[in-house]
Amino acid sequence: MSRTTIMTNRRDKARRERDAFDRLRAELTRAFAAPEESYALLTAAEVIARNQWQARQ
């Protein structure tokens, strides 16, 4: 493999990782942008039941 190909592959990988990080950061920003008043207290059992229900959908 040529040096140019290796460098191109490294740049492509770095770009893909940067894009993935930017998507994750945007998703987390949206997730935590909700006002605290919109949060609801849940028990562990309620979270497990909710996640099991969502997995079946």
Image (cartoon, helix red, strand yellow):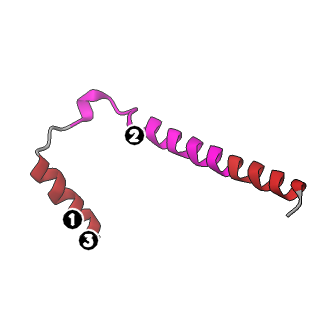
| Residue, disc 3 | 56
Q: In the image, which disc is placed on residue 37?
A: none
Q: Is the residue 37 above or below the residue 6 in the image?
A: above
Residue type marked 3:
Arg
**Residue 27 is inside the magenta segment:** yes
The residue that label 2 is drawn on is 31
Residue at position x 40%, y 32% in the image = 33
Is there CB contact under 8 Å for labels 3 and 1?
yes
Q: What is the residue that sits farthest to the top in this orientation? A: 36
Amino acid type for the residue under numbered disc 2? Ala
Determine whether the residue tagged by mark 3 lies in a helix, strand or loop: helix
Mark 3 neighbour density, 10 Å: few (under 14) some (14–19) many (20 or more)? few
Could you tell me the amino acid type at mark 1? Answer: Trp
- Where 6 falls versus 19 (above or below)? below
Q: Number of callouts in the render?
A: 3
The kind of secondary structure element at disc 2 is helix
Image quarter in which the N terminus is found = bottom right
Say which of 14 and 55 sits in front: 14
Q: Is residue 57 above or below residue 27?
A: below
